[in-house]
Amino acid sequence: MTPTPPRQPKTLLGAITQAVQTVQAKVNFSQLKLKPNARVPELWVQDAGADKADIYPLLGDRYLLGRSSQSCDIVIRNPVVSQVHLSLMRDSSKPGILGYFFHPPFFLKDENSTNGIFRGKRRVRTARLKHGAVYTLGPVELAAAVRIKYIDPPPWYARVFQYGMYGVGGVTALAVLGVLIEWQKFSVRPLPASVQGPIVVYARDEQTLLSPNVNRTHTEFKDLKEFSPYLPKAVMASEDSRFYWHFGVDPIGTLRALVTNIRGGEIREGGSTLTQQLARSLFRDYVGTQDSAARKLREAAVALKLETIYSKDFLLLTYLNRVYLGNGAYGFEDAAQLYLGKSARDLTLSEAATLAGILPGPNSFNPVRNYEKAIDLRDRVLNRMVEMGMVSQEDAQKARRSRVQVNPKAREQLESSIAPYYYSYIFTELQELLGEQLAEEGNFVVETALDPKMQATAEASLREGVATIGANAGFSQGALVTIDAPTGEIRALVGGTDYKQSQFNRASQAIRQPGSTFKIFAYIAALEQGISPGTAFSCAPLNWEGQYFEGCRSGAGSLDFYPAVAQSENVVALRVGQQVGLNQVIKTAQRMGIQSKLVPNPGLVLGQSEVTPLELTGAFSILANGGVSNRPHAIRRILDGGDCQDRKNLKTCREIYVAKQDLPQNQTVLRPEVADTMTDLLRGVVQNGTGRAAAIGQGEAGKTGTTNDNVDLWFVGYIPGGLVTGIWLGNDKNVATYGSSGQAAQIWGNYMGKIVR
């Protein structure tokens, strides 16, 4: 069959275009050389009986394929193939949805061939070529049929994007299905009655309150306009800038939170809207308290249903009336009266931004407990309000210069709490157990492990020790932690000498070098490797990784573990650490509860890597308990304050968390013989070593620790099978002191002598 002659162009531009395409098409494929890794479409042509296909890079926009060498760009010497069998034309005007990723497609057209073009057994006249598509020239049943294949794989990032979209679509579909199923399980009309209650914290006796539970009259406004006009704007700027845009769940905020959490490797943002927070607070029984994906799904279902039934203004009003703002205050009217001594109707821009700013952590960031932090958060809210066009730059600047007047009665009330450092730590642990957002919503009853008498003795002992000894020795601060080793319960925790002057909790937040107290991990690692405590190590000076360490202070030629530990000889501990390996020392410390970053260099053995007093004391508690670990914890139980038959009787409240059930119990970390041998070594420290000032005649064992220039002074000791106490002394600004670890041991002895007798 004679091929259809090409159409003559009707315009000058058409003639030029056809000429260019003809030149581009007339390619000598045998001499064509592409750059390495060049990605161009290819046509694979395999003649009948050929071992492999011929490959033709498709660089131009138009090709003819057939038996004629004069008319065709790709010539196939096969009688089944017509003189001009087919044409290939690139259509740059149809890049497709993923045109940014893929080449413009080629279209195949049958040029009135005799034997046709087939896709399987189906004859085709025209077709858009896709990667991997296979066609035959002539029916597939013919033995002489020619096979052609189009190759144009998308780049890896296009495939990732494509499959990612499939994944997003699948997850979205499952989420929608889950929401629809959950939708039928609850009702949002009418809203649950307001059940308000603070976070009530009890000592272990279930009677002593750590903070006064003041009963206040709860006030709710009936109209959004009753609040200061600045307040709704400040709240939206702080918590949900797209409140009037989204439908209860903010996909942008959720995606941002997801990316932030993935990058950080931990949960840093929740991405919850105001409606989701309201859903979680009002429907706690249905939504649940577990920090899980299932809870998030239920939370989203409630939020979507709330947005379907109620107006945005009503939901915002409900949020402003009921959100928990710390210290038993629910809603902004209660919070304004508590913290500022005025109505939420009368809040200035500065005051509204201050109250909105404390929403992420009202118990910790309110202007009474931490004025500086509250002001910093206020300024962030003001900046956000300016960015959103809610207030002018001039008004925001004026608000920044305004001092927030704190209600003096609130300060008196909050400072009247017993064990303030212990009380503040409770909220850190509460967030770890329930999640940050849920923990701040209140209406919980928390039973702690606090021993009020022990706590009072601890506070007095630390305060008196710093005041008397520290005045001459040059240190002004300290921290003390007491843990019941058999249970892991924190019986006392003191984070400083005066909570009113400084709310920084040095027991749980201060990262300090532990000095020689850290040597225990090198000796434990050695004992676990079968090295006898009677093995002598040289006292000669040591060069290790370019660092020079002096020999033993005693002048002995060599020492075994007993005198080396008692006298805290550095060079012996270093040689022990060198023999067992620094990585093994780190693994031992981490297995015993040290979570702070540890650097594998020689200084590690001598305590150059920083830890908190709480985690170091927790590690020693494993030795006190014969090698068995119970995670240090301050919270024994968490009860739902909104689900009590009688709030005065804790037994009638629903349990959310029980440490004895939910925490790992009695996990063996060290072999008993290793723990007992290490205890014998540490007894020598108290009996005839650097910790003699800690002796109280109860079989106590412990370890002193001092860093360079006496910056940090430590003693961590325990009564086997009983209490373990860690004490740190020093200055907040890492200033050198004139003291010694023996003074920490002295305070330890004074304190422990009072509580164990």
Image: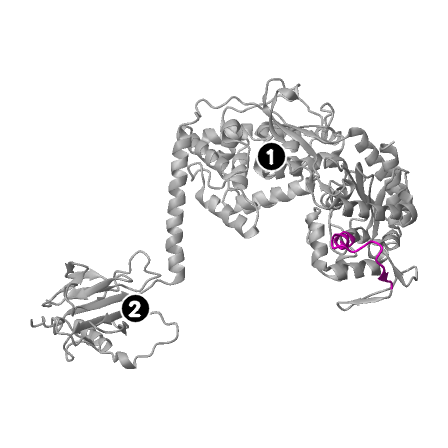
Residue 676, image quadrant: top right
Q: Is residue 69 above or below residue 113?
A: below
**Residue visible at 79% across and 59% down in the picture:** 576
Instruction: Identify the secondary structure beneath mark 1.
Output: helix
> Which residue position is annotated with label 1?
439
Residue 537 among magenta residues: yes
Residue 561 horizontal/vertical position (percent): 84, 54
Look at 38% across and 63% down and name the residue there.
155
Q: Position of residue 635 (x, y in %)?
A: 68, 33
Disc nearest the viewer among 2 and 1: 2
- Mark 2 and mark 1 lie on one chain; the one further toward the N terminus is 2
Q: Residues within 10 Å of mark 1 (few under 14, many from 20)?
A: many
What x and y, as percent, mark residue 56?
27, 73
Magenta-tinted stretch: 522-539
Seen from the viewer's position, the closer of residues 469 and 526 is: 526
Q: Quadrant of the C terminus?
A: top right
Q: Amino acid at mark 2?
A: Pro
Is residue 570 visible to us here? yes
Q: Is residue 662 left or right of residue 54?
A: right
Residue under circle 2?
Answer: 41
Q: Is 245 displayed left or right of 340 in the figure?
A: left
Note whether residue 351 is visible.
Answer: no
- Report the residue that reaches farthest toward the bottom: 31
Q: Is residue 197 above or below residue 693?
A: above
Q: Are marks 2 and 1 in contact (CB under 8 Å)?
A: no
Q: Amino acid at mark 1?
A: Ala
